Image (cartoon, rainbow, N blue to C red):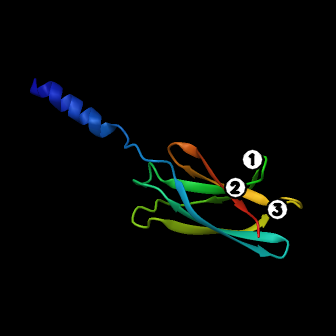
């Protein structure tokens, strides 16, 4: 009986912890000439190198990526955190874009935040 309990307990520790997808907390946008700068604040229950928010991207209204900000490391003790992406070219006539975040385990989140361009 003890042996079976020990095996089940070790299996429980071997399964990855379930975390919510990355959440976009805030977005600020600034136009710099013909290009745009995005500051995006994300919250995610990063657990280490095996599961962390590893990117976010700017999407046009058709869902096509306009720019991607890769995140180089987990932010375990820095939550939420803000990272910037400059030099994003927005096509003429586009009045709003969406931001989508990704984590290293589950991929791109189904949550997108749509923001109007100033």
Taking the image as shown, residue 96 lies to the left or right of residue 53, namely right
Between the residue at mark 3 and the residue at mark 2, the CA separation in whole angstroms equals: 12 Å
Q: Residue at horizontal 52%, vertical 53%?
A: 22
**Marks 2 and 1, Cα distance to the nearest angstrom?**
8 Å
**Which of the labelled discs sits on residue 35, or is there none?**
none
Residue 3 placement, left or right of 82: left
Marks 2/1 in contact by CB < 8 Å: the verdict is: yes
Whichever of callouts 3 and 2 sits on the residue coming sooner in the sequence is 3
Quadrant of the image for the C terminus? bottom right
**Location of residue 2 with respect to 69 vertically, above or below:** above
Find numbered disc 3 in the image and state the secondary structure of the residue it sits on: loop
Q: Residue 72 location in percent, x, y? A: 55, 61
Counting residues from the start of the chain, the first of labels 1 and 3 encountered is 1
Mark 3 vs mark 2: give the one in front.
2
* Numbered-mark total: 3
Q: Which residue is mark 2?
A: 98
Going from N to C along the chain, the mark reached first, 2 or 1, is: 1
Q: Which residue bears the numbered disc 3?
A: 90
Q: Quadrant of the N terminus?
A: top left
Question: Alpha carbon of mark 1 to alpha carbon of mark 3: how far?
Answer: 13 Å
Identify the residue at horizontal 76%, vertical 59% (top origin).
96
- Give 86 or 48, whichever is nearer the viewer: 86
- In the image, residue 97 lies at what x, y percent? 74, 57
Marker disc for residue 63: 1
> With respect to residue 106, does 85 lie above or below?
below
């Amino acid at each position: 009986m003890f042996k079976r309990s020990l095996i089940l307990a070790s299996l429980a520790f071997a399964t990855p912890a379930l975390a919510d997808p990355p959440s976009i907390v805030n977005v600020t946008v600034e136009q710099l000439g013909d290009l745009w700068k995005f500051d995006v604040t994300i919250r995610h229950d990063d657990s280490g190198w095996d599961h962390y928010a590893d990117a976010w991207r700017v999407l046009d209204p058709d869902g096509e990526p306009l720019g991607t900000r890769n995140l180089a490391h987990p932010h375990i003790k820095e939550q939420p955190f803000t990272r910037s992406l400059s030099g994003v070219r927005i096509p003429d006539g586009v009045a709003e874009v969406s931001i989508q975040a990704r984590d290293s385990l589950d991929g791109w989140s189904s949550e997108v935040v749509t923001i109007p361009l100033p």
